[in-house]
Image (tube, rainbow, N blue to C red):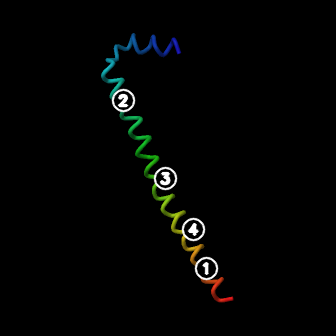
Amino acid sequence: MLQITQFILLANFSPEASNNSAVGMIGSFIAAGLLIVVPATAFLIAVSQNDKLDTERAGRRR
């Protein structure tokens, strides 16, 4: 960890650039998570509801 800190200080990175980069990285993680989680959740809810409806229909036929 000390080597990374020394590298940043020697490379003359500004704290603003580092902060903007970190915010962008976190934002992209959140966006990627939403891109994956929202469609998967919608798909699983749809499959679950269809299964429930099929089960109820099969129960009425008996």
Task: Tell me the residue at 61%/79% (across/down).
Answer: 56
Residue type at tag 2: Ser
Quadrant occupied by the C terminus = bottom right
Labels 2 and 4 touching (C-beta < 8 A)? no
Q: Nearer the viewer, mark 1 or mark 4?
A: 1
User: Callout 4 environment at 10 Å: few (<14), some (14 to 19), or many (20+)?
Assistant: few
Mark 3 element type: helix
The residue that label 2 is drawn on is 21
The residue that label 1 is drawn on is 56
**In the rendered view, would you say 61 is above or below 45?**
below
Q: As rendered, which of 39 and 11 lies closer to the eye?
A: 39
The residue that label 3 is drawn on is 37
Residue type at tag 1: Glu
Task: Tell me the residue at 52%/64% (across/down).
Answer: 45
Left or right of residue 15, residue 4 in this image:
right
Residue type at tag 3: Val
Label located before the other in sequence (2 or 4): 2
Residue 6, image quadrant: top left
Labels 3 and 4 touching (C-beta < 8 A)? no
* Label of residue 48 in the image: 4
Label located before the other in sequence (3 or 2): 2
Labels 3 and 2 touching (C-beta < 8 A)? no
Label located before the other in sequence (1 or 2): 2
**In the rendered view, would you say 42 is above or below 62?**
above
**Residue 31: x %, y % from top left:** 40, 45
**Residue 41: x %, y % from top left:** 50, 58
Task: Work out how far the residue at label 1 is from the one at label 3, CA to CA, in angstroms.
Answer: 28 Å
Label located before the other in sequence (3 or 4): 3
